[in-house]
Image (cartoon, rainbow, N blue to C red):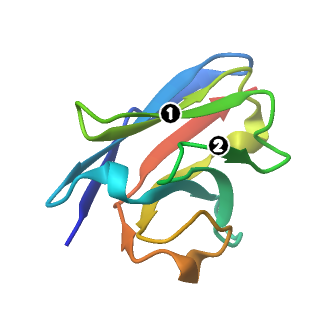
């Protein structure tokens, strides 16, 4: 059983940066594909980025490509999401999720979820 805890959210101005962390316990995170999702008020949860368990290949949805970077630190059992050039439309609750198989963009494709961390980008 994997427990995930997100941190690093906060309030930032347009154009600013944040680094989100997804710390795991109960298992080594390098055995899992780990994704970041986000959910804005009144909207469905959407995928943002994923890092694979096999070769650490990284994947990004269009809204994140070129601005966000996903990475993992196996020594800290943590996956990060570096977010640069933030926009007001990036405002959402951000969740990390882990799956023992491979990266995918579907919420039902992940077995383990964190509780979320709020990101607010002001205009």
Q: Is residue 51 left or right of residue 104?
A: left
Q: Looking at the image, is 23 positioned above or below residue 69?
A: below
Question: Relative to the observer, which residue lies in front, 2 or 43?
Answer: 2
Q: Is residue 66 left or right of residue 105?
A: right
- Element on which disc 1 rests: strand
User: Where residue 38 sits: x, y (%)?
Assistant: 60, 56
Q: Looking at the image, is 60 positioned above or below residue 4?
A: above
Q: Residue most toward the left?
A: 26
Question: Relative to the observer, which residue lies in front, 8 or 26?
Answer: 26
Mark 2 Cα-neighbour bin, 10 Å: few <14, some 14–19, many ≥20: some
Q: Residue most toward the front?
A: 55
**Residue identified by numbered label 1:** 71
Q: Which residue is drawn at the image coordinates 68% and 68% (left, top)?
A: 105
Q: Quadrant of residue 22?
A: top left
User: Where residue 40 sits: x, y (%)?
Assistant: 65, 58
Q: Residue most toward the bottom?
A: 108
**Residue identified by numbered label 2:** 58
Q: Looking at the image, is 17 positioned above or below residue 112?
A: above
Question: Relative to the observer, which residue lies in front, 24 or 5?
Answer: 24
Quadrant assignment for the N terminus = bottom left
Mark 1 Cα-neighbour bin, 10 Å: few <14, some 14–19, many ≥20: some
Q: Which residue is drawn at the image coordinates 58% and 23% (left, top)?
A: 12
Q: Are marks 1 and 2 in contact (CB under 8 Å)?
A: yes
Q: Which residue is drawn at the image coordinates 55% and 79% (left, top)?
A: 109
Q: Which residue is drawn at the image coordinates 34% and 61% (left, top)?
A: 115
Q: Looking at the image, is 21 positioned above or below residue 123?
A: below
Q: Is residue 90 left or right of residue 55?
A: right
Q: Earlier in the sequence, mark 1 or mark 2?
A: 2
Count of numbered tags: 2
Q: Quadrant of residue 114?
A: bottom left
- Element on which disc 2 rests: strand
């Amino acid at each position: 059983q994997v427990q995930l805890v997100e941190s690093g959210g906060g309030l930032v101005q347009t154009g600013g940066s944040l680094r989100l962390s997804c710390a795991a316990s109960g298992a080594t995170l390098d055995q899992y594909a780990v994704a970041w999702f986000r959910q804005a008020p009144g909207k469905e949860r959407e995928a943002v980025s994923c890092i694979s368990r096999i070769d650490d290949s990284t994947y990004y949805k269009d809204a994140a490509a070129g601005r966000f970077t996903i990475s993992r630190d196996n020594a800290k059992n943590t996956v990060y999401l570096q977010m640069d050039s933030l926009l007001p439309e990036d405002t959402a609750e951000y969740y990390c999720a882990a799956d023992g198989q491979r990266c995918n963009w579907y919420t039902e494709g992940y077995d383990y979820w964190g509780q979320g961390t709020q990101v607010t980008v002001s205009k």
